[in-house]
Image: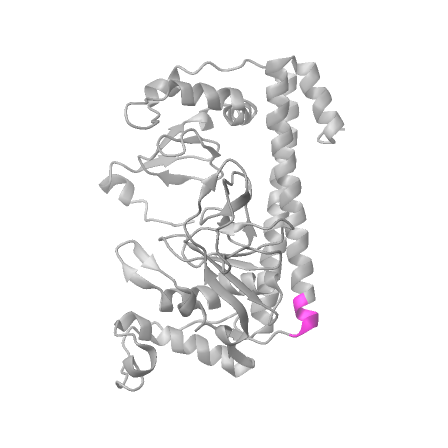
C-alpha cells in the first residue's frame, strides 16, 4: 500500500482518515464494492467510509458482512444516482435498511471471520518466507543501494546502447543492483530465455467464451479470477492465449505497473492489452513472479518503464532487458512449496469469509438457524 505523511490530511481536505474496523464503499465506477479497514489509513473522495470502528467489533464485523451480501449490494446499486452513471452518495447509504441479527449469530460469524483473518496472516507469512529465501539465495537480502542520484555516462554507454535519454534510467542504484546480482549469481537477460513475451489485445467481450485477465486481476503473486468478464477467441492465428504455467505482468498504470503473478489455473484465458504474458523454462512460474515482485524486479520496472504523469508503460521489449539470476532446482522447489502453502491458506481464508457472508444471506432468506446450519455443513464452525 502507498503511504503518505499524516500532515497531508490537514492540507488536502479531500483526504479523510479512517480507523481500523471502519467500512469503505466505492461510490463511482464499480459501485458498492466493500472493504474492511485493517489499520488506520487515509481515503480519497472516491470512497465513502462508515465509522463502524465506533461500534463493538461484533457489530462492526456483522455490518461488514451484511454489506458484502447480494441483498445489500442490490439495495445500494438500486438506490444509487443514475443521472450519468451509477454513483453512491452518503445520504443514499444512510437510507439503506440493515438486517437485525441476534447476538449469538453475530458472535458466531465473528469467530468465522477471525479464523479467516488468521489464515490470511499465515498466508502472508508463508509468501514472505518464500521471498526471503529467494533474496537470500541470490545474495541481495540486505541490498542497500547508493542514495546518489547523479551519474555520468558517455553517448556510447547511454543512448547508443539503450536508446534512452532520460536521466532516471541511469541512476546509480540500478547499476548497484546489477553488480550485486552478478557478484553472487550467473545472470541472464530474461528475453534470452523467454519462449513467449507478448501483450494481449483489446478483447471482444461476449456473454460466454474465455475469461479475460486485466490489470486488476494480476495481483502481487496471484491471479484473482473472482469477477472476470468473457470474450470470444480472436480470429487470428497468433492470438495471445494464457496457459497454465505462464507468468502475467501488468504493463500500465501507477500502482499496478510491474505487478506479476503466476497463472496456475488449468483453464485457458485471454489477456487484455495491458497484460504481458511471459513463458519460460528458465525458472518456475512461481519463482519468476516472486523475483519480479521483489526489490530486484521492481527496481528494474522503475528503470525500464516509459512515460510520465500517470501515462506510464512497460512494454514486452523492456521486460526482455531484465536481468535474472540462475536458481538451482532445489531452491526453486523450496520456494514453490512455501508459495503453494501460501496459496492454500489464502484460499482457506477466502472460503471462510465467503461462508460467513453466505450465512448472513441464508439468515435473511430463511432464518438464523438455517444460516448456522450452513456454517456447520461447510466446516466453518464445529
User: x, y percentage for residue 96?
Assistant: 43, 16
Q: Residue at x 32, y 64 (%)?
A: 306
Q: Quadrant of the C terminus?
A: top right
Residue 80 appears at what percent x and percent y?
36, 22
Which residue is located at x 53 percent, y 71 percent?
194
Query: In the picture shown, does residue 118 fall above or below 150?
Result: above
Q: Is residue 256 magenta?
A: no
Instruction: Point out the stretch of residues depicted in magenta.
Output: 328-332
Residue at left 51%, top 59%?
237
Q: Nearer the viewer, residue 128 or 170?
A: 170
x and y, in percent, of residue 43 in the image: 36, 38
Q: How many marks?
A: 0
Q: Main secondary structure of the magenta part?
A: helix
Q: Nearer the viewer, residue 200 or 99?
A: 200
Q: Position of residue 192 (x, y in %)?
A: 51, 76
Observer-nearest of 234 and 366? 234
Question: What residue is shown at x 32% (from left), y 45% (from top)?
Answer: 6
Q: Horizontal placement of 327 versus 294: left or right? A: right
Left or right of 267 on screen, residue 53: left
Amino acid at each position: 500500500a502507498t503511504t503518505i505523511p499524516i500532515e497531508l490530511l490537514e492540507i488536502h481536505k479531500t483526504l479523510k482518515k479512517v480507523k481500523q474496523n471502519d467500512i469503505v464503499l466505492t461510490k463511482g465506477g464499480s459501485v458498492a464494492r466493500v472493504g474492511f479497514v485493517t489499520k488506520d489509513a487515509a481515503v480519497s473522495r472516491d470512497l465513502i467510509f462508515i465509522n463502524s470502528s465506533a461500534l463493538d467489533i461484533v457489530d462492526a464485523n456483522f455490518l461488514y458482512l451484511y454489506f458484502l451480501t447480494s441483498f445489500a449490494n442490490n439495495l445500494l446499486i438500486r438506490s444509487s444516482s443514475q443521472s450519468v452513471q451509477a454513483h453512491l452518495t452518503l445520504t443514499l447509504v444512510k437510507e439503506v435498511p440493515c438486517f437485525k441479527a441476534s447476538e449469538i449469530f453475530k458472535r458466531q460469524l465473528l469467530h468465522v471471520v477471525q479464523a479467516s483473518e488468521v489464515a490470511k496472516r499465515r498466508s502472508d507469512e508463508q509468501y514472505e518466507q518464500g521471498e526471503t529465501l529467494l533474496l537470500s539465495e541470490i545474495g541481495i537480502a540486505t541490498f542497500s543501494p547508493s542514495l546518489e542520484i547523479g551519474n555520468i555516462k558517455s553517448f556510447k554507454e547511454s543512448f547508443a546502447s539503450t536508446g534512452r535519454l532520460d536521466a532516471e534510467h541511469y541512476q546509480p542504484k540500478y547499476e548497484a543492483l546489477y553488480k550485486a546480482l552478478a557478484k553472487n549469481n550467473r545472470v541472464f537477460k530474461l528475453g534470452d530465455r523467454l519462449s513467449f513475451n507478448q501483450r494481449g489485445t483489446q478483447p471482444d467481450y461476449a456473454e460466454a467464451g474465455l475469461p479475460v485477465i486485466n490489470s486488476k486481476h494480476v495481483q502481487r503473486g496471484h491471479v484473482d479470477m473472482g469477477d472476470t468478464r468473457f470474450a470470444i477467441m480472436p480470429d487470428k492465428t497468433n492470438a495471445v492465449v494464457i496457459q497454465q504455467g505462464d507468468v502475467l505482468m501488468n504493463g500500465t498504470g501507477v500502482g499496478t505497473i510491474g505487478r506479476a503473478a503466476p497463472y496456475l489455473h488449468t483453464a485457458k484465458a485471454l489477456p487484455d492489452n495491458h497484460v504481458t504474458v511471459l513463458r519460460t523454462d528458465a525458472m518456475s512460474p512461481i519463482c519468476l513472479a516472486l523475483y519480479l515482485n521483489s526489490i530486484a524486479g521492481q527496481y528494474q520496472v522503475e528503470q525500464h518503464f516509459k512515460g510520465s504523469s500517470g501515462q506510464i508503460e512497460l512494454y514486452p521489449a523492456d521486460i526482455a532487458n531484465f536481468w535474472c539470476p540462475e536458481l538451482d532446482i532445489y531452491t526453486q522447489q523450496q520456494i514453490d512449496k512455501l508459495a503453494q502453502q501460501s496459496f492454500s491458506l489464502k484460499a482457506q481464508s477466502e472460503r471462510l469469509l465467503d461462508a460467513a457472508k453466505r450465512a448472513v444471506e441464508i439468515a435473511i432468506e430463511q432464518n438464523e438457524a438455517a444460516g448456522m446450519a450452513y456454517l456447520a455443513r461447510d466446516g466453518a464452525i464445529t
